[in-house]
């Protein structure tokens, strides 16, 4: 997965917090930055685990999940 995420309930940068506020203003419950820990919990229900987290420019991450 690629994009901006929260980590442990916290924004990684002020710009990610502002971006999250902006997209949540559309009032679509599914939109908004997801937390890495929530994604780990959900993917774990399907036998996947976070294998690697890569920091990228512009405060984005790549999350690589694989079979646990």
Image (cartoon, rainbow, N blue to C red):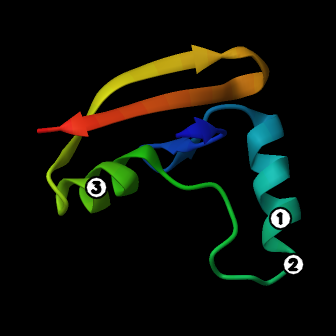
Task: Indicate whether 51 appears above or below 28.
Answer: above
- Disc 3 vs disc 2: which is toward the camera? 3
3D distance between C-alphas at marks 1 and 2: 6 Å
Q: Position of residue 35 (x, y in %)?
A: 48, 51
- Which residue bears the numbered disc 1? 23
Q: Is residue 57 above or below residue 16?
A: above
Q: Are marks 1 and 2 in contact (CB under 8 Å)?
A: yes
Q: Residues within 10 Å of mark 1 (few under 14, many from 20)?
A: few
Tell which circle, 3 or 2, labels the residue nearer the N-terminal end: 2
The mark total stands at 3
Q: Which residue is mark 3?
A: 43
Query: Few, some or many C-alpha atoms within 10 Å of disc 2 (few <14, some 14-19, many ≥20)?
Result: few
Give me the residue at 52% from left, 40% from top: 1
Q: Which residue is mark 2?
A: 26
Please provide percent x and percent y for residue 47: 14, 52
The image shows residue 30 at horizontal and vertical percentages of 63, 76
Q: CA distance from mark 3 to mark 1?
A: 24 Å
Q: Nearer the viewer, residue 45 or 23?
A: 45
Q: N-terminal of the two: label 3 or label 1?
A: 1
> In the image, is 17 to the left or to the right of 54?
right
Relative to residue 61, is residue 48 depicted above or below? below
Q: Is residue 56 left or right of residue 42?
A: right
SS type, badge 1: helix
């Amino acid at each position: 997965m690629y994009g901006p995420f929260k980590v442990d309930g916290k924004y990684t940068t002020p710009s990610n917090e502002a971006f999250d506020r902006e997209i949540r203003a559309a009032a679509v419950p599914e939109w908004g930055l997801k937390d890495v820990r929530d994604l780990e919990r959900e993917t774990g229900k399907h036998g996947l685990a976070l294998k690697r987290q890569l920091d990228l420019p512009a405060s984005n991450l790549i999350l690589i999940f694989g079979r646990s």
